[in-house]
Image: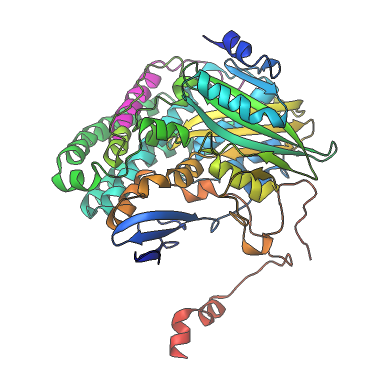
Amino acid sequence: MSEGKYIVEIPVGPQHPALHEPISLRIKVDGEQVIDVNVVAGYNHRGVEWLAERRTFYQNIFLVSRVCGICNAVHGAAYVQAVEDLLGIEVPPRARYLRTLVMELERIHSHMLILAVLAEVLGFETLFMLMMRDRERIMYLKELVTGNRVHADYMFVGGVRRDLSTEKKDTILKHLAYIEERMKYYEKVWSEDPIILKRTQGIGIATKSQALAHSLVGPVARGSNVKNDVRFTDPYDAYDEIPFNIITRDEGDTWARMMVRIDEIYESINMIKYILEHLPTGPIIPWKNIKAAPRRFPKGEGIGRVEAPRGELLYHIVSDGGVKPYRVKIRTPSILNIHNGVFMLLNQYIADIPAIFTSFDPCISCAERVTVIDKEGKKKNIPWRKLADVSYVRKLFR
Amino acid sequence: MGAPSLSELLREFGELKPYKRVNRYYINIDSSQLRSVIKKLKEAYNGEIYLSSITPVDYIKDGVIEVNYEIQILPINTLIVLKTKIPRDNAVIDSIVDILPGAKVLEQEAHDLMGISFNGNPYLRKPFLLPEELAEETPLRKDWKPKTR
């Protein structure tokens, strides 16, 4: 309470109404309006950077993919790009195109997911289910190309781990045509439905200078007209050979961020079509056999940057000449968008918080990566019965 | 515009060196000059720069922590890494959160995991990402060991 105002603190989360991941927003409100936001994080810390210093360069390819489930292929791609930067390896053209193919498939399904989740937050549960149903086709295509539906584990230092046979091209094109058709319908819903427009337009605004100063990345920045896309500013893999447009919008509100994602899905579909048409022939790794991959790593450093579905993802690797990296820094897009983007919640209404926050496409598992180790170092297996004993419900009935 | 003008701009602070990939450079600067370098970059490019990451690396043998500031300069599509060194036992560096507010969370993370104090950042708290029982510890320093049985 301060000077006659009734200020109430409301905890939003860690069981968040919008996300199925743990993060807590401590929101101070004056009446219905938000006046201060404090992000409490750390519920999901797993220690990936610490672990990466204790595993070999090759083991880490599979570790970093586990940082995030939704954008696992881009994590692998950023890491191997940093290692290739360290080693000075040239990636064969076919592998560069195949990497791009998988990363664009990932962008489509990630954007569809967050579009669906925001629809659910706004109360459009049928739209959520329809989009998730169609998204499943992209998951199928990802399985077709990489062998796994979720965790692709597709990237390898120097190339990729699986080739693409020509028969699969038709299947991919068939499903993409379906997705493109469906996206036209979803775009119509997102741009015409009066309830969606009322709940997203003009709320959670970030201006261009705010987006730049607060280091916002990805669709959140591009929704505020910041032309920041690593695919364009620092081209990697095949992005310097594939034609595509950077999607930006001027509005800077929640709706603009979602429309950027819808337009990016069309761009990704066109890119995949281009890749399948112009896929170069040749090997997928620079050596005859994968066993010939380098075993010695020079002293030095490597930086890997890719445009993940959520924004710029940066890996900074330092090597001291051993088989393990000396330091692996992972800077995910979500940590910037979640913690620095909360200024957009100020002066908004409580009811709009889930919609604004979801439009950042926050990924908690990306933002938090340090392990929880029991102080005594004991491994704890807690049986369900014991867990139930300490539970609140059990106490009520005691 | 391009790399020559960038090296011209930063001549007084040190020599700009290229990485292997195009449009990526690094420069070794003194930690006391960090703020003036970033101010200069921000002015020269009309604020169209953004702080991509802060990467602290613990060199325990040399007794220093190297703090890397990866900054993307949008008008010339260039990544520049500012490398500064601070002593390990007195890990204090000036905060840049008033120049680039985006540094807030990156400084919080570096403070929490590497134990660096950023002078002038009011948001620092410990634990930030770590669990309560590790509040006093800095897991990413090389001499940190998890308690074993």
- On screen, residue A162 versus residue A260, left or right, reads right
Q: Position of residue B110 (x, y in %)?
A: 64, 44
In what quadrant of the picture does the N terminus of chain A appear?
bottom left
Residue A138 visible: no
- On screen, residue A141 versus residue A316, left or right, reads left
Q: Name the residue at 57% across, 75% down.
A: A383
Residue B109 visible: yes
Residue extent of the magenta highlight: A262-289
Query: Which residue is nearer to you in this view: A379 or A156?
Result: A379
Residue A264 lies in the magenta stretch:
yes
Q: Residue furthest right?
A: B61
Number of dots carrying numbers? 0
Q: Residue furthest front?
A: A3
Q: Position of residue B102 (x, y in %)?
A: 51, 38
Q: Position of residue A365 (x, y in %)?
A: 51, 50
Q: Position of residue A378 (x, y in %)?
A: 71, 67
Q: Is residue B103 above or below residue A30?
A: above
The colour scheme of the drawn protein is rainbow
Quadrant of the rendered image containing residue B26 = top right
Q: Name the residue at 35% across, 60% down.
A: A29
Q: Name the residue at 43% across, 43% down.
A: A341
Residue A250 lies in the magenta stretch:
no
Quadrant of the rendered image containing residue A350 = bottom left
Query: Which residue is nearer to you in this view: B80 or A179?
Result: B80
Query: Which residue is nearer to you in this view: B9 or A97?
Result: B9
